[in-house]
């Protein structure tokens, strides 16, 4: 009941604050006011926008965008924005209501445009196999929204950001073009690094067991098999029952993986218990749906991806 009441209160407060908030105004030599829905997307936007934008990120480091509960301040930020960047593919299930409540006139840009999404199967994760989606009333959508786990997809996201910023602020096109090209070159180098690291790992060891099913695009592009995920597609999924836990342990043993992985946005307790029961290591924590806080090694998208591939390869070797 609490989870139903709180969003309603947020919407009511948002309407009141948005009515008092200034609406987006022409930049007139100032910075373009930009909102990004989550930290990973915010980093991509900042790399393209540079000092020509004023960026507000709604869901910050180490916070899970799946089950985020918006605040009235988020509504004010949307009301003041010129451009709002979102992932799309039903990733930010809370955004439509918040945007409407804010009265925002901002241009909404789904950075997943032009990316071929992975269609989710009826039983696309360990949690779905046991009916958690229906039981907990959460619909994740028809497609896997975790597009950033592929660097090729991230490059398309950057191109979408570049085009949207130019459309909103054509006077600074040269800056956006230059920043985008420089960052795309960094992403090219990142992609080469990931593939180089993967090539050091024998194909039979390229198997992943993680907290939730965020690695679909990663597995597709870099040749990994997802053996199992401990939770449903979002952190809202319930932990497995005793019977399901035992089945997960058997799947891990049968796969012969030396390590499994927890994630920075999800409590690691379940993965710690699974590792102990299956007799495998718990690998370094992976940064998946959010960047890390400063000093943790995943503060930017590039650092996050480098950390993840080094952690995965190192643990699975």
Image (cartoon, rainbow, N blue to C red):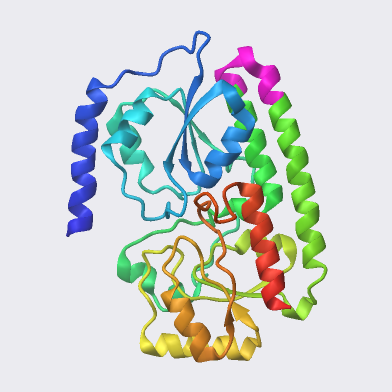
Please tell me whether residue 52 is drawn above or below residue 314 in the rendered image.
Answer: above
Q: In which quadrant will I find the N terminus?
A: bottom left
Please tell me whether residue 106 is drawn above or below residue 305 in the rendered image.
Answer: above
Q: Residue at x 60, y 39 (%)?
A: 44
Q: Main secondary structure of the magenta part?
A: helix
Please say whether residue 187 is visible from this viewpoint. Answer: yes
- Whether residue 306 is in magenta: the answer is no
Rendering coords of residue 112 (x, y %):
58, 43
Range of the magenta residues?
166-177
Q: Residue at x 19, y 28 (%)?
A: 16
Rendering coords of residue 276 (x, y %):
50, 87
Q: Residue at x 56, y 87 (%)?
A: 251
Horizontally, residue 29 falls left or right of residue 56, namely right
> Which quadrant of the structure image shows residue 97?
top left
Horizontally, residue 104 falls left or right of residue 91, namely left
Q: Residue placed farthest to the top in the image?
A: 28
Rendering coords of residue 186 (x, y %):
75, 42
Q: In which quadrant will I find the C terminus?
A: bottom right
Horizontally, residue 242 falls left or right of residue 205, namely left
Horizontally, residue 2 falls left or right of residue 57, namely left
Please tell me whether residue 124 is drawn above or below residue 39 in the rendered image.
Answer: below
Please tell me whether residue 121 is drawn above or below residue 194 in the rendered image.
Answer: below
Rendering coords of residue 275 (x, y %):
52, 84
How many numbered discs sit on the rendered protein? 0
Please say whether residue 129 is visible from this viewpoint. Answer: no
In the depicted view, which residue is nearer to us: 149 or 59? 59
């Amino acid at each position: 009941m609490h989870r139903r009441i709180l969003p309603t209160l947020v919407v009511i407060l948002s309407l009141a604050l948005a009515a008092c908030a200034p609406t987006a105004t022409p930049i007139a030599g100032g910075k373009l006011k930009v909102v990004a829905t989550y930290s990973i997307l915010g980093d991509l936007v900042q790399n393209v926008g540079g000092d020509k934008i004023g960026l507000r990120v709604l869901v910050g480091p180490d916070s899970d965008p799946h089950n985020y509960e918006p605040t009235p301040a988020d509504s004010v930020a949307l009301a003041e924005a010129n451009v709002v960047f979102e992932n799309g593919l039903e990733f930010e299930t809370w955004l439509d209501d918040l945007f409407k409540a804010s009265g925002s006139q901002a241009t909404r840009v789904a950075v997943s445009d032009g990316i071929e999404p992975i269609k989710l199967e009826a039983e696309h994760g360990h949690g779905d196999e046991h009916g958690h989606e229906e039981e907990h009333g959460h619909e994740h959508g028809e497609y896997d929204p975790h597009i950033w786990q592929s660097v090729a997809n991230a490059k398309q996201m950057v191109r979408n950001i570049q085009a949207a910023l130019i459309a909103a602020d054509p006077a600074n096109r040269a800056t956006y073009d230059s920043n985008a090209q420089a960052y795309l070159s960094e992403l090219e180098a990142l992609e080469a690094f990931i593939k180089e690291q993967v090539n050091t790992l024998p194909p039979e060891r390229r198997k992943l067991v993680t907290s939730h099913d965020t690695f679909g695009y990663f597995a597709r592009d870099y040749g990994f098999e997802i053996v199992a995920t401990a939770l449903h597609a979002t952190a809202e999924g319930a932990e497995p029952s005793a019977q399901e836990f035992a089945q997960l342990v058997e799947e891990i043993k049968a796969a012969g993986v030396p390590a499994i992985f927890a994630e920075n946005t999800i409590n690691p307790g379940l993965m710690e218990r699974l590792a102990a029961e299956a007799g495998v290591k718990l690998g370094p924590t992976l940064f998946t749906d959010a960047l890390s806080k400063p000093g943790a090694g995943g503060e930017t998208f590039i650092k996050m991806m480098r950390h993840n591939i080094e952690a995965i390869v190192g643990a699975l070797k």
